[in-house]
Image: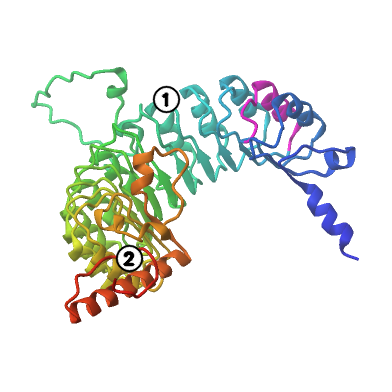
Amino acid sequence: MNRPDVDLEDMKRIVDRLPQTESERQIVRHLVIRDPNCGVSDEWVAPEMIFCRQLESVVLSGVTDTSDKTIVHLARENSNIQGLDLTGCKYVTDVSIMELVAKTPPLQWLQLSGVVLTDASVSAIAKTFPRLVELELNDQPLMTAVSVRDIWSYSRKLRTLTLAHSPQLTDSALPSPIKTLTPQPSGEKPLPARPHTWLDQLPPLILCHTAIDLRVLDLSHCPKLTDAGVEGIVAHAPVLRSLALAGCPNLTDKAVESISKLGLHLGNLTLAHCPRITDNGIVSLARSCTELRSVDLAFCRQLTDMAVFELASLERIHRLVLVRVPKLTDNAIYFLADHTSSLERLHLSYCDRITLKSLHHLVRTCKHLVHLTATGVPGARRTGVGRFSDPPPADLDPDQKSVFRAFSGPNVAALCKFLDKEKLRREQAEAQNIPFVARSDDSMDLY
């Protein structure tokens, strides 16, 4: 008896294909095309934007040749549209985005990563769609502080904002930590300003409101950001749960101390490729943000075992990325294994000082561990260990494939069992005064 209702619900959401009948065109509410291999091209999508007039959400990230014509048809013919995903649609330009802004009702979510936009379009989006909850604008080489300031000023209901890989963004794109401008004393002559560009003349962005709804912010690989920008972010968005600042080389411990003010709200933090961060910043972070669940510190080369000792005190930590942190030693791994029972995923690739002995203790002690990467770790190249590793990605060269070590799911337990057996063989060999020879199989034979 419920079969017609099931069919109706299925027809409201069409995935990786286009509507095939007039009934589907009248009923469909959500058109989702994410698979680039599904055979759908822009020339077929454009007419459907005219015929399907009840669409509420459209995802065209799988139609990489999507054109302005398609988006213009969508904007003009669909008065119920609430969300649009054009990720990777590189042929979409300001022309159709401006039409979208002019014709559609206020959108609730918009994903435009990889769609190269100018400041005019970004500002129009911020000023016209005040109900936006999610806005993705990654990979924007032309976007500057001018339009991003409008996002902070007008899009006050945002919960997710991603601006990664936007090389033109500077601290002036972000809210200022100060709330009022202090006038210069009349008798004091200010130093002459010599801005490099007109963008450097932008005054501090002083906002009277705070982004109390913002939970996720991604500013990864915005290389011009500094500690002052991070201080302004934390002051304006005090309840962030996820913050990504990977690839911002100018950040120092001062930025980490500002992040620490998020306290119990912060759950996920990415600081990979921030080479100026030291143990002092991580100590402050771990002692203030005790609800952290995921921390990425890959390529933070100044960190030592002390940083890991502090992170191991986090009761809820389940993911830790320490790739290419060369100063880590076995002491950090032993401490992590003994004090972090919640750990599920650990990445230790290219940490040259870590031995197989500490990795054995880790997999034996951390009962919840389901993923371990140890690519490039010398101890992980021992005889027999490689057979428990996941297959290496096809795009790696032969040398990279030879050192690839990633253990997932049942293979973690299997690796532990194998290393237990080899430890027992070593003990038996020593008891019988026999030279120990490592084996790659599961046999207990000493010879």
Name the foreground residue: 368 vs 151: 368
Residue 104 drawn above or below residue 365: above
Name the foreground residue: 104 vs 438: 438
Find the magenta span and give its range.
62-79
Callout 2 amino acid: Arg
Residue at (85% x, 40% y) in the render: 26
Residue 403 drawn above or below residue 384: above
Query: Which secondary structure lies at badge 2?
Result: loop
Name the foreground residue: 146 vs 163: 163
Of badges 2 and 1, the one in the foreground is: 2
Q: Which mark is residue 439?
A: 2
Residue at (43% x, 23% y) in the render: 142
Residue found at the far bottom of this picture? 431
Query: Which secondary structure lies at badge 1?
Result: loop
Q: Is residue 236 shown to the viewer in this render? A: no
* Residue ID for mark 1: 141
Residue found at the far front of this picture? 447
The question of residue 28 being in magenta is answered with no
Quarter occupied by the N terminus: bottom right
Q: Quadrant of residue 200?
A: top left
Counting from the top left corner in percent of width and height, residue 243 is at 37, 49
Q: Which mark is residue 261?
A: none
Closer to the N terminus: mark 2 or mark 1?
1
Counting from the top left corner in percent of width and height, residue 108 is at 60, 43
Name the foreground residue: 167 vs 438: 438
